[in-house]
């Protein structure tokens, strides 16, 4: 969650100082050289100064939550990104106007000016890499947008440098350079505008992120079905909703499962501000029953973890008919310790609905594992599989539900 003094705010202040310096130096050099491209680039940096001010304001406002804005003002960062992109378009217009209508007077200058202009290329290059890196670390669209703006400044400054170099040797490429700079700025501005508008219009979180969240939910044994996973960006944060079906009808357990899922997703996915999970009990006709057996004689094992096999039976509860049954080997029954919880984890991979045992699993590891997954555990008095299945089909099984 954001705080009142975000660590990345200082980067916005650095951006303002860098733009002020670039604008001042370029403006002075434009008078020294008489370069139209350099003067237009000075206008570019001057507009960027206002963009940096908007960036700082956006970073501060986006971290505020009030009763009128309970979901926060995260999108202010995207609004700032739109402002920056529009300022880039204004810059492009100024550049093209100067290139078409402006009058230039070439002024002789020393080679040292070229060295200063070359340094002006390195400054935005280094700062853009730094700002974009910080923006990605904190998932700040406005910092990333401002960093891309500095990247565009690198291109424009490079073109200005070569135009001045050509001018120094008597080749008049100033207006052409100004036109090329304009194209770079328009391209950068359009990219920022389209990305920001997607967020402001609540476009979906990217598919890869949603698929990762869906996989996390599906890995939860208590979830039987993931109906949908949707999300939207708000500034550098995400709001995610999931519609799922759970294996339990117990509301307390369902709420615990929902909280566990929310915590897991927030730990795995950066910057999920809110995770809203809609859950409902699974409506089933065919139920899967599981119980331990001692071997081919299909006697029900007295001890859960020590039984060499487990019988899995699917029963259609409306037709009172066995749809499918098979035996599952227990690879852990010879272990000295921890076999019960390992067996429970193995069985959960086969999505049981009800587990029958002759021993009481309450207060034991397997019982907790099944309860967390929303799987019912019942203690049976039946001695063999045939007897238990007869009772299940007739609905007369005497059990103790856990």
Image (cartoon, rainbow, N blue to C red):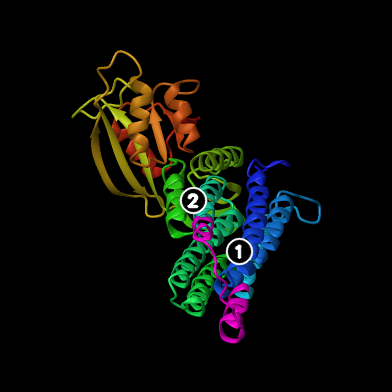
> Is residue 360 magenta-colored?
no
Eye-nearest disc, 1 or 2: 1
Give the structural element (helix, strand or loop) at label 1.
helix
Magenta residues, dominant SS class: helix
Furthest toward the bottom, the residue is 101
User: 298 or 198, which is in the foreground?
Assistant: 198
Picture coordinates of residue 8, whole percent (x, y): 63, 44
Picture coordinates of residue 7, whole percent (x, y): 64, 40
Furthest toward the top, the residue is 336
Looking at the picture, does residue 85 appear above or below residue 93? above
Name the residue at 33% across, 39% down: 389
**Circle 2: is it few (<14), some (14-19), or many (20+) Cα within 10 Å?**
some
Picture coordinates of residue 364, whole percent (x, y): 46, 20
Mark 1 lies on residue: 29
Picture coordinates of residue 260, whole percent (x, y): 54, 38
Name the residue at 36% across, 39% down: 289
Residue 309 visible in this rendered orientation of the protein: yes
Q: Is residue 393 left or right of residue 206?
A: left
Magenta part of the protein: which range?
91-118
Lower sequence index among marks 1 and 2: 1
Furthest toward the left, the residue is 296
Determine which quarter of the picture holds residue 388.
Answer: top left
Q: Is residue 19 left or right of residue 161?
A: right
Q: Which disc number belongs to residue 282?
A: 2
Q: Is residue 260 left or right of residue 310?
A: right
Name the residue at 63% across, 59% down: 25
């Amino acid at each position: 969650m954001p705080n009142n003094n975000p660590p990345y705010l200082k980067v916005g202040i650095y951006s303002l100082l860098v733009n002020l310096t670039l604008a001042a130096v370029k403006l002075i050099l434009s008078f020294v050289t008489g370069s139209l491209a350099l003067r237009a680039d000075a206008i570019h940096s001057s507009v960027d100064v206002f963009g940096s001010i908007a960036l700082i304001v956006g970073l501060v406002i986006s971290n505020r939550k009030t009763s009128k804005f309970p979901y926060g003002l995260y999108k202010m960062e995207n609004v700032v990104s739109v402002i920056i992109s529009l300022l880039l378009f204004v810059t492009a217009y100024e550049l093209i106007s100067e290139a078409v209508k402006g009058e230039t007077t070439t002024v002789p200058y020393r080679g040292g000016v070229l060295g200063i202009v070359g340094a002006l290329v390195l400054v935005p290059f280094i700062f853009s890499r730094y700002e974009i890196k910080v923006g990605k670390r904190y998932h700040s669209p406005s910092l990333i947008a401002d960093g891309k703006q500095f990247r565009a400044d690198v291109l424009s400054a490079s073109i200005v440098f070569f135009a001045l170099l050509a001018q120094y040797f008597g080749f008049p490429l100033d207006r052409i350079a100004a036109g090329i700079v304009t194209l770079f700025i328009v391209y950068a501005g359009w990219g920022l505008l389209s990305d920001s508008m997607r967020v402001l219009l609540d476009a979906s979180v990217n598919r890869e992120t949603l698929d990762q969240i869906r996989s996390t939910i599906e890995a939860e044994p208590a979830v039987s079905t993931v109906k949908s996973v949707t999300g939207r960006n708000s500034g550098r944060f995400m709001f995610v909703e999931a519609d799922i079906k759970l294996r339990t009808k117990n509301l307390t357990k369902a709420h615990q499962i929902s909280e566990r899922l929310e915590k897991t997703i927030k730990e795995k996915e950066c910057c999920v501000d809110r995770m809203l999970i809609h859950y409902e009990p699974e409506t089933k006709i065919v139920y899967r029953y599981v119980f331990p057996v001692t071997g081919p004689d299909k006697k029900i094992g007295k001890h859960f973890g020590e039984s060499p096999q487990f019988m899995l039976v699917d029963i259609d509860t409306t037709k009172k008919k066995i749809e499918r049954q098979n035996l599952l080997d227990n690879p852990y029954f010879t272990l000295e310790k921890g076999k019960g919880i390992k067996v429970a984890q193995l069985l959960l991979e086969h999505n049981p609905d009800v587990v029958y045992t002759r021993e009481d699993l309450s207060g034991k590891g397997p019982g907790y594992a099944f309860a967390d997954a929303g799987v019912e555990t019942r203690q049976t008095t039946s001695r063999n599989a045939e007897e238990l299945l007869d009772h299940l089909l007739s609905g007369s099984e005497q059990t103790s539900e856990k």
